[in-house]
Image: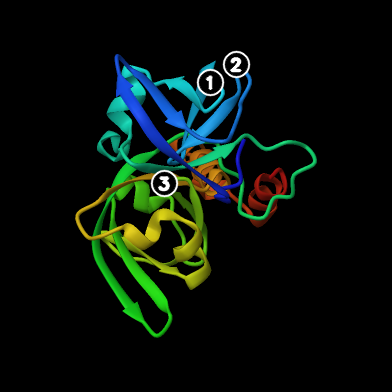
Amino acid sequence: MFSGLIRQFARVRNYRNNILCLESPLFPSLGDSIAINGACLTAIETQKDYFCVEISKETAQSIAIENLIGLVHIEPALQFSDGLHGHIVQGHIDSIGLIIKKETISNQTIFHVQADSKTLELMINKGSVCVDGVSLTINYVCDKYFELVVIPHTMQTTLFHAYQTGRRVNIETDIIVRSLFSLMQKHIANKQHNNITQAIFDSITLGY
């Protein structure tokens, strides 16, 4: 489990034979979970100045693999003593988005990120989303894309300052919205949608 609060970068040392090695002051133990650009991966080797993780074929096909060069966002798994300053992130990438617009208005940077319809269904205005491992707030959702308003602090402390149009990014939707959507779909599939009262909806939401 992660928070989407990026405090560290790592530099890609090499990536071959499904093994990604990263130069970083982070010294994980074998088996530790680490989010790399938002994807939860497992440490399989640690050295004094770098560590390695393995990327399965399935994971490689579901993330923006071409971005595993240069610097990447990294986040170690949350500990019980850590505060949750972002939002609950699993490190499971739902889809790949595409930055189709970037503009600066006043001191804020606006990104339009194109995504497929299934991903956009799981987004709500002012809700949370994790993009390349960074916890962000969705400004609004359109038919083909969602808009992010990124403040200067986030631009300076993440790799977003270098992001340009045409870049693909890893997207993880909010687990709470995703879970509620799935539960409601099951009710509809069971033809119980006419019986979904406010009490039932409250019982579902209170469970989270």
Residue lying furthest bottom:
106
Q: Residue at x 55, y 45 (%)?
A: 180
Kindly identify which numbered label has been placed on residue 43. 1
> Which type of secondary structure does the marked residue at label 1 adopt?
strand
Q: Residue at x 33, y 77 (%)?
A: 104
Q: Residue at x 25, y 60 (%)?
A: 164
In the image, residue 120 sits, relative to residue 140, either above or below, namely above
In the image, residue 121 sits, relative to residue 54, either above or below, namely below
| Other-residue count near label 3 (Cα within 10 Å), few / some / many at <14 / 14–19 / ≥20 | many
Per the model, the C-alpha gap separating discs 1 and 3 is 19 Å
Per the model, the C-alpha gap separating discs 3 and 2 is 23 Å
Q: Which residue is mark 2?
A: 30
User: Which amino acid, mark 2?
Assistant: Leu
Say whether marks 1 and 2 touch (CB < 8 Å): yes
Q: Position of residue 89 (x, y in %)?
A: 56, 42
Q: Position of residue 162 (x, y in %)?
A: 32, 59
Q: Which residue is mark 3?
A: 132
Residue 195 or 157: which is nearer the viewer? 157
> Which type of secondary structure does the marked residue at label 2 adopt?
loop
Is tag 1's residue or tag 3's residue first in the polypeptide sequence?
1
User: Which amino acid, mark 3?
Assistant: Asp
Q: Is residue 154 visible?
A: yes
> Which type of secondary structure does the marked residue at label 3 adopt?
loop
| Other-residue count near label 2 (Cα within 10 Å), few / some / many at <14 / 14–19 / ≥20 | some
Per the model, the C-alpha gap separating discs 1 and 2 is 5 Å
State which mark lies toward you, 3 or 2. 2
Q: Is residue 192 visible?
A: no
Q: Position of residue 41 (x, y in %)?
A: 48, 26
